[in-house]
Image (tube, rainbow, N blue to C red):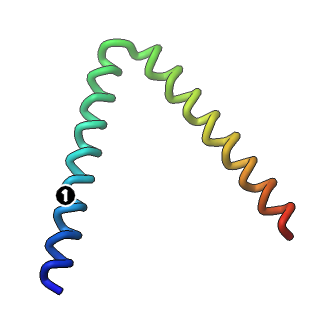
Amino acid sequence: MARLFAVAKQKLERQAKSCQSQQTTAQKQEVRGHVSTTIFLRVCASVQQTTARKQEARALKRH
């Protein structure tokens, strides 16, 4: 049981470090090119919306 806990804790710590480094990278890019970052975020949001709509349509078809 202790081993499972240790493994889970390591996994969470790795994810936190990864998340932190991505955040730092995003901040550096924002300083370099605010416009390109904004465009990227808009495209990303648009893709997520499209994906959500497709999933919603599939769910509606099932019912």
Task: Say which quarter of the image contains residue 25.
Answer: top left
Q: Quadrant of the N terminus?
A: bottom left
Residue at horizontal 37%, vertical 13%?
A: 33
Q: Is residue 11 left or right of residue 61?
A: left
- Give the x, y percent position of residue 22: 30, 36
Q: Is residue 34 found left or right of 8 in the rendered image?
A: right
Quarter holding residue 31: top left
Looking at the image, residue 43 lies above or below residue 14: above
**Depth check: 30 or 48 in front?**
48
Residue at 79 percent across and 57 percent down: it is 58
Give above or below for 35 relative to 18. Answer: above
Residue hosting label 1: 13
Nearer-the-camera pick, 4 or 39: 4
Circle 1 — which element?
helix
- Residue shown at the point (55%, 33%) measured from the top left: 44
Residue 36 screen position, x and y as percent? 46, 15
Figure quadrant of the C terminus: bottom right
Q: Residue at point 86% right, 61% down?
A: 61
* Vertical position of residue 25 compared to residue 10: above or below: above
**Image location of residue 40, percent across then percent down:** 50, 24
